[in-house]
Image (cartoon, grey):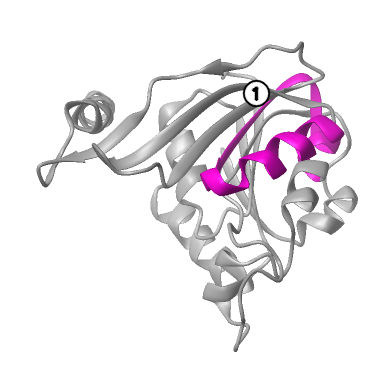
């Protein structure tokens, strides 16, 4: 991400991704969108505690109404970790904050991708964390709204176990070409894998340099 970029993190929750992006990128402005008031307020407190008010903004908004807040075609990058469970795929006894975070109660996969496509610039980047079993839905919906899938990576809890997370990157109005990255394994023999340690070490080194 470039220094002048604007990033929007949809379904930001308590703002973890937005705050991490402020440390890992040079993006000028990062906007987190969260429908749940309590989560949005927690995110705002985290932003303030980390003295990031000049770069990170948290909006308590329904992404389906975002057109009143963010114009079309002005965002460089969209990130999102949306509710994974498809509407109607499970019995919901009580609608609470956890249910909203996990199930498509307030927004669907299509709502998320449609809004991302609206606010992204041409050639703007789209990054999503989701479940592998929703991959067909993800790709079909991305193409429907002209976000071309470009890279995919499966995340496995450990060697020999099936992937439980998929990372997807797309480009608004991008050309057709899909690259499969090597799988990412989190644990080996009960310990983090070397790659996971490397990811954490890079983050620690960067924090030490900044301090």
From the viewer's perspective, tell me whether residue 31 is left or right of residue 55.
right
Residue 130 in view:
no
Residue sitting at 60 percent across and 27 percent down? Answer: 169
Q: What secondary structure characterizes most of the magenta part?
A: helix
Residue 70, horizontal then vertical, whole percent: 83, 43
Q: Per the image, is 118 magenta?
A: yes
Q: Which sits in the foreground, 81 or 33?
A: 81
Residue 73, horizontal then vertical, whole percent: 85, 29
Residue sitting at 60 percent across and 88 percent down? Answer: 94
Residue 59, horizontal then vertical, whole percent: 68, 56
Q: Which sits in the foreground, 94 or 115?
A: 94
From the viewer's perspective, tell me whether residue 142 is left or right of residue 48.
right
Q: Quadrant of residue 6?
A: top right
Write down the residue under mark 1: 5
Q: Quadrant of residue 3?
A: top right
The stretch of residues the image draws in magenta is 115-144
Residue sitting at 40 percent across and 42 percent down? Answer: 163
Tell me: residue 80, above or below residue 21: below
Tell me: residue 138, above or below residue 93: above
Q: Quadrant of the N terminus?
A: top right
Tell me: residue 181, above or below residue 50: above
Q: Quadrant of the C terminus?
A: top left
Residue 185, horizontal then vertical, whole percent: 28, 34
* Mark 1, other Cα within 10 Å: few <14 / some 14–19 / many ≥20: some
From the viewer's perspective, tell me whether residue 83 is left or right of residue 46.
right
């Amino acid at each position: 991400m470039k220094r002048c970029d604007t990033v929007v993190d949809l379904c930001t929750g308590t703002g973890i991704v937005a705050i991490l992006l402020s440390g890992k990128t040079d993006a000028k402005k990062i906007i987190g969108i969260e429908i749940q008031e309590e989560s949005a307020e927690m995110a705002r407190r985290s932003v303030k505690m980390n003295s990031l008010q000049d770069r990170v903004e948290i909006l308590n908004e329904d992404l389906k109404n975002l057109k009143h807040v963010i114009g079309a075609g002005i965002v460089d990058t969209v990130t999102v970790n949306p509710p994974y469970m498809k509407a109607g795929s499970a019995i919901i006894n009580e609608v609470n904050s956890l249910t909203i975070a996990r199930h498509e109660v307030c927004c669907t996969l299509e709502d998320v991708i449609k809004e991302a496509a609206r606010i992204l610039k041409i050639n703007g980047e789209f990054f999503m964390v989701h479940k592998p079993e929703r991959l067909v839905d993800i790709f079909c919906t991305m193409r429907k709204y002209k976000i071309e899938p470009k890279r995919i990576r499966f995340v496995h809890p450990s060697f020999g176990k099936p992937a439980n997370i998929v990372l997807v990157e797309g480009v608004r109005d991008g050309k057709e070409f899909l690259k499969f990255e090597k799988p990412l394994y989190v644990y080996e023999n009960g310990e983090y894998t070397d790659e996971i340690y490397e990811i954490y070490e890079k983050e620690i080194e960067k924090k030490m340099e900044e301090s």
